[in-house]
């Protein structure tokens, strides 16, 4: 187990050494679960050639960007911003934009225009889903949970589809469980604040995922 953790830590360190901006606090990457994203994306396609490694890095950048920008959107909607909060919002916006720019730079710079087009469609859909969650008041609790799952699994689905991987469903469920049900992630917390009924349905789905996992063993 330690060797696995050491390997995952090395993945994180390699990514950070290569891409982290000098002025960015490394703790911010824990908040967006960089280690877990690196792990799961590699689980989908463990062996990568040089071209595929570029796509892998680009997807990690976009995943980080999407999650950091989540915090910008919600923090911006709050009133009574303190000076410290404004600084944090601005920093998160800059970090999100920084990693988004790496996504474009890596794919366009290496001529991976088909990959760029493929993943951009998913990014647009994820952002549309976020807007629906933020601004549609008559969503059912089930719709809310479905859309939260889409936010966290969207790029993973696109990645598996890009490589036309067929044996992905079991890992897909693990990814959804990890990011949506093993703890209350950012979007679940926010949706519960807006609609208390979300918590009961979230707990119900959490139990179902855990039961299904036990039955597969």
Image: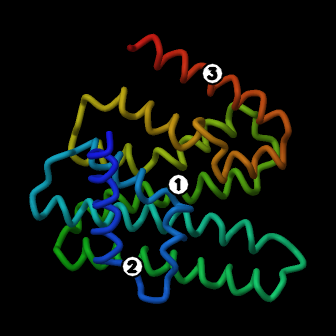
Mark in the foreground, 1 or 3:
3
Kindly indicate the quadrant of the structure image that contains residue 4: top left
Q: Give the Cα distance between marks 1 and 2.
A: 24 Å
Q: Residue furthest front?
A: 2
Q: Say whether disc 1 or disc 3 marks the residue closer to the N-terminus.
A: 1
Secondary element type, mark 3 = helix
Q: Horizontally, is 170 left or right of 189 in the view?
A: left
Closer to the camera in the image, 185 or 7: 7
Drawn side of residue 12 relative to residue 82, left or right: left
- The residue under label 3 is 207
Residue 49 in the image: above or below residue 205 = below
Q: Position of residue 7 (x, y in %)?
A: 27, 53
The residue where tag 2 is placed is 20
Q: Residue at x 74, y 84 (%)?
A: 86
Q: Is residue 4 above or below residue 51?
A: above
Q: Could you say whether the residue bearing mark 2 is in a helix, strand or loop?
A: loop
Q: Quadrant of residue 93?
A: bottom right
Quadrant of the image for the N terminus?
Answer: top left
In the rendered image, residue 168, in percent from the top left (x then y), is placed at 31, 32
**Which residue appears at 27% of the width and 68% of the height?**
14
**Quadrant (top left, top right, bottom left, bottom right) of the C terminus:** top left
Q: CA distance from mark 2 to mark 3?
A: 37 Å
Q: Are marks 1 and 2 in contact (CB under 8 Å)?
A: no
Image coordinates of residue 130 in percent, x first then y, are: 63, 55
Tag 1 residue: 126
User: Which residue is found at the position 73% from the left and 48% from the top?
Assistant: 189
Image position of 11 (left or right of 152): left
Residue 61 drawn at (x, y percent):
38, 68
Q: How many marks?
A: 3
């Amino acid at each position: 187990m330690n060797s696995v953790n050491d390997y995952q830590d090395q993945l994180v360190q390699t990514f950070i050494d290569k891409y982290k901006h000098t002025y960015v606090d490394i703790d911010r990457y824990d908040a967006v679960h960089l280690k877990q994203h690196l792990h799961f994306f590699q689980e989908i396609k463990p062996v990568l050639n040089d071209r595929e490694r570029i796509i892998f890095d680009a997807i990690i950048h976009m995943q980080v960007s999407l999650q950091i920008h989540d915090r910008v959107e919600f923090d911006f909607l709050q009133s009574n911003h303190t000076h410290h909060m404004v600084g944090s919002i601005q920093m998160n916006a800059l970090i999100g934009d920084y990693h988004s720019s790496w996504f474009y730079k890596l794919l366009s710079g290496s001529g991976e225009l088909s990959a760029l087009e493929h993943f951009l469609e998913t990014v647009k859909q994820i952002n549309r889903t976020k807007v629906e969650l933020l601004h549609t008041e008559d969503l059912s609790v089930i719709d809310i949970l479905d859309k939260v799952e889409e936010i966290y699994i969207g790029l993973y689905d696109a990645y598996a589809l890009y490589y036309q991987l067929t044996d992905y469903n079991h890992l897909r469920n693990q990814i959804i469980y990890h990011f949506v049900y093993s703890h209350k992630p950012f979007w679940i917390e926010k949706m519960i604040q807006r609609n208390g009924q979300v918590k009961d349905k979230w707990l119900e789905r959490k139990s179902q995922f855990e039961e299904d996992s036990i039955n597969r063993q």
